[in-house]
């Protein structure tokens, strides 16, 4: 840039949160319908987790990085790799000889750590809006319920009825994320509040 050339105006960027929330929400609904015994975990769930829950959220997180949004970057990239790791956890035993599938203690620890992550992200939403508070609040509960009932997930014991309840709670979480995604898209398109997100502090 020449010394006397005026700086260029910031490039207007689209809001990647709509994509990230949609990818998270749809995949969460699908997996938790399986937890609720509506259908089994099959290639539909795994493909959705790998590409929509995983890749789409990572793309959204990278774009949040470009916008300087630490919360959005951490959430979308974090949960994007959660979905990818979950898929690989399920398929690696069939791909790599000698690699065992998860046992209940390991799976419970895995889910507990993601519950901790979700919980501290929930506290971040207290400064954002009610829609995200709902998503991260129900997500924290979801992870801790799954953590407490890991044997039922693996089909080696546990409380099947609790797992079904947990699945429906997870569907509610996913629907909340889809709502938040729709609000991001429609409110921007129509230049007004079509779907409220209940912001924690009014815009100046």
Image (cartoon, rainbow, N blue to C red):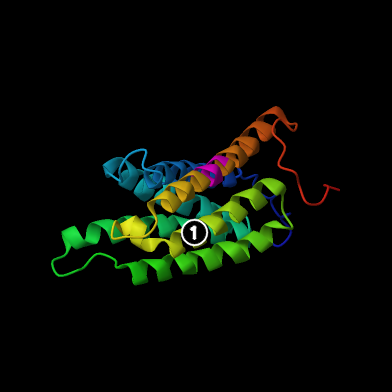
Quickly name the residue at label 1: 145
Image height of 47 relative to 152, above or below: above
| Residue 97: x %, y % from top left | 13, 66
Residue at 29% in and 66% down:
102
- As drawn, the residue found furthest toward the top would be 190
Residue 37 seen in this snapshot: yes
Q: How many marks?
A: 1
Front position in the image: 16 or 27: 27
The x, y position of residue 172, in whole percent, is 55, 43
Which element is circle 1 on? helix
User: Is 73 positioned to the left or the right of 200 in the image?
Assistant: left
- Left or right of 154: which side holds 62? right
Q: x, y percentage for residue 50?
A: 35, 50
Magenta-tinted stretch: 171-175
Extreme residue toward the right, this view: 204
Q: Is residue 89 above or below residue 18?
A: below
Residue 134 higher or lower than 182, as above or below: below
> Which residue: 16% across, 64% down?
96
Mark 1 is surrounded, within 10 Å at the Cα level, by few (under 14), some (14 to 19) or many (20 or more) other residues, namely: many
Name the chief secondary structure element in magenta: helix
Q: Nearer the viewer, residue 111 or 56?
A: 111
Q: Quadrant of residue 147?
A: bottom left
**In the image shown, does 203 or 95 lie closer to the viewer?**
95
- Residue farthest left in this picture: 97
Hey, which quadrant is residue 126 in on the image?
bottom right
Q: Is residue 175 above or below residue 124?
A: above
Residue 37 rendering spot, x and y as whole percentages: 36, 42
Which quadrant does the N terminus fall into? bottom right
Q: Is residue 2 visible?
A: no
Q: Is residue 177 magenta?
A: no
Write the residue at 54% across / 68% down.
116
Q: Residue at x 58, y 47 (%)?
A: 17
């Amino acid at each position: 840039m020449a010394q006397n050339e005026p700086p260029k105006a910031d490039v207007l960027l689209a809001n990647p949160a709509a994509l990230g929330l949609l990818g998270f929400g749809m995949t969460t609904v699908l997996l938790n319908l399986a937890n609720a015994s509506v259908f089994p975990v099959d290639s539909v769930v795994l493909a959705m987790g790998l590409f929509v829950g995983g890749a789409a959220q990572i793309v959204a997180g990278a774009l949040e990085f470009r916008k300087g949004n630490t919360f959005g970057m951490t959430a979308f990239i974090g949960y994007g790799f959660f979905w990818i790791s979950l898929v690989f956890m399920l398929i690696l035993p069939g791909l790599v000889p000698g690699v065992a599938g998860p046992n209940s203690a390991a799976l419970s620890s895995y889910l507990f750590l993601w519950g901790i992550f979700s919980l501290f992200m929930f506290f971040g939403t207290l400064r954002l809006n009610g829609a995200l508070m709902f998503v991260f609040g129900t997500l924290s509960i979801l992870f801790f319920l799954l953590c407490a009932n890991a044997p039922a997930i693996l089909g080696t014991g546990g409380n099947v009825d609790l797992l079904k309840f947990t699945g429906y709670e997870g569907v509610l979480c996913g629907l909340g994320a889809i709502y938040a995604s729709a609000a991001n898209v429609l409110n921007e398109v129509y230049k007004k509040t079509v779907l409220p997100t209940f912001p924690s502090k009014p815009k100046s």
